[in-house]
């Protein structure tokens, strides 16, 4: 068939997470609860950090930005997944699919850059404690956060710019539950081998190297903490291990998805659920349950709200 005779498809059809109606209902209830908890947990972080003046520090300023990113990132796919679980026909228009890919990579990229800024913040706090406040002032933190969003935007523009010129003439069935580069690229009506190699290099290789760099930086930080003592050392180690956990939960699934040939594997959907739905939920759990300052701030907020509730009754 001539390229000029190819008709661009109008929509993609998702095969979804399962074809079983009973399992669809179970997944709807489970993923609905996870998504609701993700939103509420991250909103709680935003409210507590904004309300408690004791948390008006660079670390919590960055944590609040991460909470915003997690809410937005999970909202790109989760509501559509929940609707599709209750629908017989699971479709998405071509334009909406490209839009979902754009925001998915914008927020996902910004998320990773934000985690990198948080690693930099911990390095400065531990290596130069006397100059920490001066170095990580509000203006610099704001600039770093803006740079994180800009980095995500540039990364996302590259992905979409490479996809938009491709012809899609059918088939239009995606063996997944959301739009992303690996699944959509395989449906293009042209040879995409070189483009696939380029995207694996752009996404997978860079993510793998970035993950190793962040792990190495935290190893250096933990080594530096060996020479310290007291309560400050314990808190710093707890914070670093929480950051390592979050970085691992974010980047290991990314490496699995993007650092290999774009062929479907049986574990793809399970990894994608962890990456898209579960990971944003674990961030508030990790940063609140392991953080004494956050727990103390939440108790203070609860105490502050308690009397007003009592007066209103």
Image: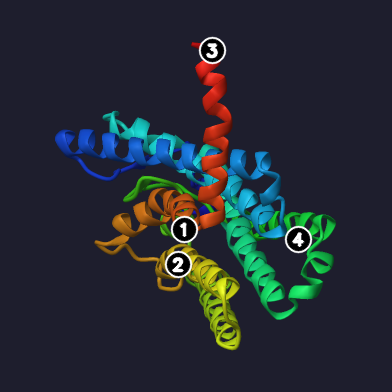
231 to the left or right of 286: right
3 or 2: tag closer to the N-terminus? 2
Q: Report how far apart the C-alphas of labels 4 and 2 lie in the structure.
A: 22 Å
Mark 3–mark 2 contact, CB under 8 Å?
no
Q: Which of the two marks, 3 or 1, is nearer to us in this view?
A: 3
The relative height of residue 171 versus residue 51 in the rendered view (above or below) is below
Q: Position of residue 147 (x, y in %)?
A: 75, 59
Residue bearing mark 3: 312
- Residue 155 lies in quadrant: bottom right
Check disc 3 and report its element: helix, strand or loop: helix
Binning the other alpha carbons within 10 Å of mark 4 as few (below 14), some (14 to 19) or many (20 upward) gives some
Residue bearing mark 2: 245
* Residue found farthest to the top: 313
Residue bearing mark 1: 185
4 or 3: tag closer to the N-terminus? 4
Mark 4–mark 3 contact, CB under 8 Å?
no
3 or 1: tag closer to the N-terminus? 1
- Residue 195 lies in quadrant: bottom right
Q: Position of residue 57 (x, y in %)?
A: 71, 56
Residue bearing mark 4: 144
Mark 4–mark 1 contact, CB under 8 Å?
no
Q: Residue at x 34, y 36 (%)?
A: 33
């Amino acid at each position: 068939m001539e390229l000029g005779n190819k008709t661009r498809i109008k929509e993609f059809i998702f095969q979804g997470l399962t074809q079983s109606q009973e399992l669809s209902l179970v997944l709807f209830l489970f993923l609905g609860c996870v998504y609701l908890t993700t939103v509420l947990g991250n909103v709680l972080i935003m409210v507590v950090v904004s309300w408690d003046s004791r948390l008006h520090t660079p670390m919590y300023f960055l944590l609040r930005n991460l909470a915003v990113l997690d809410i937005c990132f999970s909202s790109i796919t989760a509501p559509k997944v929940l609707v599709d679980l209750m629908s017989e026909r699971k479709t998405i228009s071509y334009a909406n699919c490209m839009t979902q890919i754009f925001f998915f990579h914008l927020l996902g990229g910004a998320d990773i850059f934000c985690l990198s800024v948080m690693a930099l913040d911990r390095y400065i706090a531990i290596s130069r404690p006397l100059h920490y406040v001066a170095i990580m002032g509000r203006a610099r933190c704001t600039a770093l956060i803006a740079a994180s969003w800009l980095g995500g935007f540039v990364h996302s523009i590259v992905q979409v710019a490479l996809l938009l010129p491709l012809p899609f003439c059918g088939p239009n069935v995606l063996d997944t539950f959301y739009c992303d580069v690996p699944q959509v690229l395989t449906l293009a009506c042209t040879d995409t081998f070189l483009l696939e190699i380029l995207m694996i290099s752009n996404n997978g290789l860079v993510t793998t190297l970035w993950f190793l760099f962040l792990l190495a930086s935290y190893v250096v930080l933990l080594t530096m903490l060996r020479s310290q003592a007291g309560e400050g050392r314990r808190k710093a180690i707890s914070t670093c291990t929480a950051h390592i956990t979050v970085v691992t939960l974010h980047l290991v699934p990314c490496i699995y998805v993007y650092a290999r040939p774009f062929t479907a594997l049986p574990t793809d959907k399970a990894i994608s659920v962890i990456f898209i739905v579960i990971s944003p939920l674990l961030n508030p759990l990790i940063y609140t349950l392991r953080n004494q300052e956050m727990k103390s701030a939440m108790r203070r907020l609860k105490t502050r709200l308690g009397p007003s509730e009592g007066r209103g009754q």
